[in-house]
Image: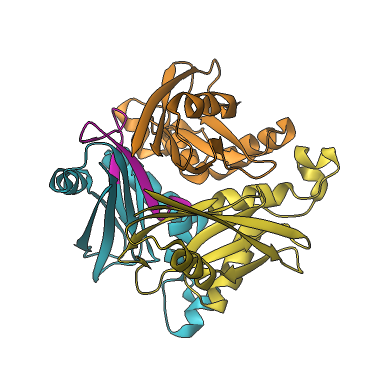
Chain colours: A orange, B yellow, C cyan
Amino acid sequence: MKSYRQELWFHIPARRGFVNITPQVERCLRQSGILEGLCLVNAMHITASVFINDDEPGLHEDYDRWLEQLAPHAPVSGYQHNRTGEDNADAHLKRQIMGREVTAAVTQGKLDLGPWEQIFYGEFDGRRKKRVLVKIIGE
Amino acid sequence: MKSYRQELWFHIPARRGFVNITPQVERCLRQSGILEGLCLVNAMHITASVFINDDEPGLHEDYDRWLEQLAPHAPVSGYQHNRTGEDNADAHLKRQIMGREVTAAVTQGKLDLGPWEQIFYGEFDGRRKKRVLVKIIGE
Amino acid sequence: MKSYRQELWFHIPARRGFVNITPQVERCLRQSGILEGLCLVNAMHITASVFINDDEPGLHEDYDRWLEQLAPHAPVSGYQHNRTGEDNADAHLKRQIMGREVTAAVTQGKLDLGPWEQIFYGEFDGRRKKRVLVKIIGE
């Protein structure tokens, strides 16, 4: 069994944003030399997400507005977590909706994704450097 | 290490629906000959879900109504994504709540599930053929 | 390829609660002797969750209140599922938000987690014994 590990770093200038990281994950897979296996991609931070959906800017606006409705940023004082001095409790909630991680199949050396599946980094508390882990195991 | 790959196809006649796919995943596992490992089951489409929960029709009605409250289909014009000519923005949102994928343990040649755990395909934009990927790795 | 399997049992005295299970998962990993691979941790029950987030009590209160807003327990009669004699339909919904499972990378014999990532058992219908499955594969 082979295994491969890589960290991807992101610095989203706004509080929230979505980045298509599929090309970077594909590059990791090529570097790994793994042909058959599983590829885990997870946020290493608890106010960010890795998820698979459509690379369509209108949809990303919809996600942003919807998440803000379900878990509004303000009033900041409405969250117990923010009594610690943080203002990012909403980001911890939004990330639960969108998920921490994706596991993708690796088949014949490629990410085995459906035709519209793209892997995204979802940031809910940006303006600083944060990491994603790519771990691939297989043969 | 062995690996196995299979696609399952579904055609849900309504816009939304839930199908218990546990028997089909079990059949894949038997075909794979894998005794110990991990079994990934994921929707290959971004308006559908694979999740584990209870095979109880009342609960499925509850899910359907709840998801429609959290991410209503109409008004279609309320979503930026639908300006592309689609009417399925809500399906992309609903699928994030329910999740894209499930990873199940494989132990002694069986899906290692709890007593009530059943694997479901969740369709949120049906009336056409769509796929689920089953990828199993192990020995 | 090596594989390891362990069940962790929990009895949460209240209906809902969160427990940091990271030390128990780390113990499993040490027992497994696996240095590189993947570690699946999943609830075996469909009204409970395994998720990764912050070990901060204020945040856990925020999660509890937020989940209760999104999927209220009462009125119990508001859910079709509860016509079966259950009163836990809300727990099946809450668990979908928080997720069933976590897959963590294993690197150099350790859980490969970000600095604040901790693994939690989330109970939404407690007051009885329930199980979590830890399955680790690798080398």
B30 relative position to C4: left or right: right
Q: Can residue A111 be seen?
A: yes
Q: Is residue C26 above or below residue B104?
A: above
B45 relative position to C66: left or right: right
Q: Residue at x 60, y 52 (%)?
A: B95
Query: In this figure, what is the number of numbered marks?
Result: 0
Query: Residue B53, how many percent across, how many down?
Result: 47, 66
Q: Residue at x 66, y 34 (%)?
A: A60
Query: Residue B135, how many percent across, how many down?
Result: 49, 53
- Range shown magenta: C97-119
Q: Is residue C114 magenta?
A: yes
Q: Residue at x 48, y 35 (%)?
A: A49
Quarter-wise, where is residue C22 in the image?
Answer: top left
Query: Residue B51, how many percent across, how many down?
Result: 51, 59
Q: Residue at x 60, y 42 (%)?
A: A113
Query: Residue C117, how many percent across, how many down?
Result: 31, 35
Q: Is residue C90 above or below residue A113?
A: below
Quadrant position of the C terminus of chain B in the picture: bottom left
Front one among C49 and B49 = B49
Quarter-wise, where is residue B82 in the image?
Answer: top right
Q: Is residue A132 magenta?
A: no
Q: Is residue A50 above or below residue C20?
A: above
Q: Can residue C79 be seen?
A: no
